Image (cartoon, rainbow, N blue to C red):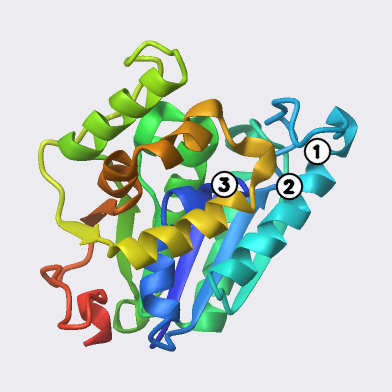
């Protein structure tokens, strides 16, 4: 067992939620594979300039390809489940497809969404549930460690401040904040800039605050430089001396 498998719902999830984790491992030569369930065709925000709503699925497909390259992801699969409709798609089918990918890649670690979807997004919740079921279906001797993306209090504070840059109420994003997380990945300023380059590949999804934040370096580091995770494996989580997940010691 080796490598990391990241299971997300939309193009941009991989960069915004787990970009630092992916970079930390790909830069050390560890194989990272990605599954993305939808093409994000419902996420229309009028960007990039000159784009048409009916072209968004292809735009986001191209954005994911660019971001995967920026993150040095080994390989990715982009599926065609409906954006906003993962929870009403065939859950057994999705679970089995994820299970087959786990069996094929034999990763040491799988990272996905938890039961709260971080802010209650139905697609996140559905993909997280299917990912958990797929991992559980792997025979125990070959079962990878499992981590969930999470939000802790410091990261929630970041989002509240960032949303103010957008002119939004600080509670506009209904984050599910964990009292305790098992692991926090703290990124270096260099890693934050590399993560930012991957995020910038998703031009169609860049809210005003994601642009304004470049003028607030401390806030940028506070938010993009912090990635909390919950560990569902039996081994107590820890980072190696190189800052990698303990499974890669």
Label 2 sits on a secondary structure element that is helix
- Indicate which disc, 2 or 3, sits on the residue closer to the N terminus: 3
Q: Which mark is residue 11?
A: none
Disc 2/disc 3 C-alpha distance (Å): 13 Å
Q: Residue at x 48, y 83 (%)?
A: 31
Residue at disc 3, secondary structure? loop
The N terminus is located in which quarter? bottom left
Circle on res. 9: 3
Q: Residue furthest front?
A: 215
User: Where does label 2 land, which residue?
Assistant: 60
Residue 18 x/y as whole percent: 41, 57
Position of residue 58 relative to residue 101, above or below, is: above
- Residue visible at 28% across and 65% down in the picture: 188
- For the residue labelled by badge 1, is the local secondary structure a helix, a strand or a loop? helix
Residue located beneath label 1 in the image: 56
Q: CA–CA distance between discs 3 and 1? A: 16 Å
């Amino acid at each position: 067992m080796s490598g990391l498998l990241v299971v997300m719902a939309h193009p941009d999830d991989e960069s915004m939620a787990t970009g630092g984790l992916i970079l930390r491992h790909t830069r050390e030569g560890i194989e990272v594979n990605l599954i993305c369930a939808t093409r994000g065709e419902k996420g229309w925000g009028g960007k990039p300039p000159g784009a048409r709503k009916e072209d968004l699925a292809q735009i986001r497909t191209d954005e994911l390809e660019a971001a995967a390259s920026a993150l040095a992801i080994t390989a990715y699969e982009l599926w065609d489940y409906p954006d906003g409709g993962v929870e009403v798609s065939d859950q057994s089918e999705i679970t089995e497809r994820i299970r087959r990918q786990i069996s094929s890649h034999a990763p040491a670690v799988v990272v996905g969404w938890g039961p709260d979807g971080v802010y209650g997004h139905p697609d996140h919740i559905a993909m997280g549930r299917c990912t958990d079921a797929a991992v559980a279906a792997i025979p125990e001797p070959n079962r990878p460690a499992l981590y969930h993306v999470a939000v802790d209090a410091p990261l929630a504070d970041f989002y509240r401040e960032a949303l103010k840059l957008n002119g939004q109420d600080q509670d506009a994003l209904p984050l599910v904040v964990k009292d305790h997380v098992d692991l926090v990945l703290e990124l270096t300023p260099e890693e934050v800039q590399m993560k930012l380059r991957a995020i910038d590949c998703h031009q169609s999804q860049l809210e005003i605050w994601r642009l304004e934040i470049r003028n607030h370096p401390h806030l940028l580091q506070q938010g993009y430089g912090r990635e909390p995770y919950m560990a569902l494996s039996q081994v107590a989580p820890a980072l190696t001396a190189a800052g990698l997940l303990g499974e890669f010691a």
